[in-house]
Structures are given as C-alpha cells and as structure tokens.
Image (cartoon, helix red, strand yellow):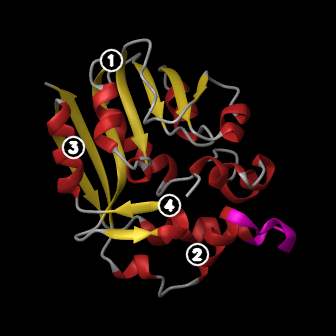
Amino acid sequence: MDIDKFYSENPPETWEKVLGPGMHYHYRGEQVLEEILEFIPPNSKILDCGCGWGGTGRFLMERGHDVTGVTISKAQAEYIKDFPVIHADLHDFIPEETYDVAVMVECYFHLSDPRKVFDNLVPHVKHLIIVDVDCPQIYEVPEFGIKIGPREYIFGNLWKVGYVVQKFYEKVDYYKETRKQWKEGLKSLAPSELTGHLEKLNHLCHFEDHDLTLRDPKQIIIHAKRR
C-alpha cells in the first residue's frame, strides 16, 4: 500500500469534519495523550514520528514542549502550521538533531521494518513512547496497510536496537467510544466525500462484526528508554 497516497487522498477540510478541530486520528483522542504525559519530562524536545494531521504535536506543544513532526504524507506536512514538520519516510529518516523523547501514536504497525526505524532513532532519542494496538496473534488489515501483532514483537524490536521497556499499559475499552465519535463525524459528509480512506473508515465504523473486533485487540502504551 502507498501510505502517502492513503493519508493524502482525502482533503484536510474533509478530515476536519470527521475528526473535529483537534484532528486526533487515533483511539481515545486526547485521553490517551494525557496518559503518556507521565513519561515526558517538562519542556522536552519531542520528535512526533508519524505525526498525522498534527493532533498529538499540538497537544504536546500546548503543554510547553518543543515539537517537530515527521510524516510520509505530503498533504499532512503541508497542513500543519503549528510546529515544524519533516516530510519523510521514517525508514529513511535519520534525525539531524537530538531529542529528549520520540512519540509514535498508532504509527508502529504501519512500519514495514520497525527495527530499522528504531535503529535510526536510538543514537538521537533517549525516551521512546509508543501508542498502538496489539492482538494475541498476527493479524493483517490490508485495507489500512497494517499488520497488528503481539506486544512481544514490539518489545523485541526495541531491545535489539538498544531500547529497554520501562513500563507499559494495556487498555481494553478503547475501541467502541472512538468508533462512535468517528461515525458521528462521517455522517456530516456528503456522499461524494466518502471516498478513498474515509470510505474504508466508514465501513469499519458501521459493521459491528468487523473482523478486527473479533481479534481481542487492546490499546497499548509503551515507555522505553535507551540503554
């Protein structure tokens, strides 16, 4: 899947109707971001990896942090005006500066080679925070270009490049409320706007028996530190 095209094919103004002014395209929105603050020292220099439409970066910037984003989507990079954004594929991205913290909010399972990405980050980033979804078994969601798996895969990839997991939480009640919010936003769209990525999201939100809901998914929050 062409992830750049997937996240760029619907215009920002359409996404704003679905996601609201915060532009949080991840499960549990600001609530989960409040929960990662315990791992972020005051006035940190933060690299937001896979920064999306800027929701996470703006949230952190408003709390006194210095944020730089990285996204593969040209449309997202051009949309964000609140903080500097680098348009790059994380697999090829090597930071030119050092950062106190890197955050990956629902970015990990888009990566085809996460170990390479971590290997590029570890000399430049002390703390790494990952928010994503994990399932007991490997599960592919081809329509969204992701392959979800057990948390042990994430832990192993972190360890092999020099990060050690300090703490993690799993949330089992994250899915339904977020889907409900997306569903309400999607109702505001004209039929002609329900194309591409948003058509797939609409399908996900309207089918209770979607395969993903049968795989016992959990939201996981991981704090890792460089050895």
Q: Sequence order check: which comes first, mark 1 or mark 4?
A: 1
Identify whether 179 is placed above or below 17.
below
- Is residue 215 in view? yes
Residue 31 percent coordinates (x, y): 45, 49
Q: Amino acid at mark 3?
A: Asn
Q: CA distance from mark 3 to mark 2?
A: 31 Å
Can you identify the residue that label 3 sits on?
Answer: 157
From the viewer's perspective, tell me whether residue 224 is left or right of residue 44. left
Numbered label attached to residue 124: 1
Q: Sequence order check: which comes first, mark 3 or mark 4?
A: 4
Nearer to us of marks 1 and 4 is 4
Q: Sequence order check: which comes first, mark 1 or mark 2?
A: 1
Q: Which residues are magenta?
A: 187-196
Q: Is residue 194 magenta?
A: yes
Q: CA distance from mark 2 to mark 4?
A: 17 Å
Q: Residue at x 15, y 38 (%)?
A: 159
Disc 1 residue crowd, few under 14, some 14–19, many 20+, Cα 10 Å: some
**Corner quadrant of residue 18:** bottom right
Q: Amino acid at mark 4?
A: Gly
Q: Residue at x 50, y 61 (%)?
A: 145
Nearer to us of marks 2 and 4 is 4
Say which of 5 and 221 sits in front.
Answer: 5
Nearer to us of marks 3 and 2 is 3
Q: Secondary structure at mark 1?
A: loop
Q: Quadrant of the N terminus?
A: bottom right
Q: Sequence order check: which comes first, mark 3 or mark 2?
A: 3
Q: Amino acid at mark 1?
A: His
Disc 4 residue crowd, few under 14, some 14–19, many 20+, Cα 10 Å: some
Q: CA distance from mark 1 to mark 2?
A: 38 Å
Nearer to us of marks 1 and 2 is 1
Q: Secondary structure at mark 4?
A: loop
Can you identify the residue that label 4 sits on?
Answer: 145
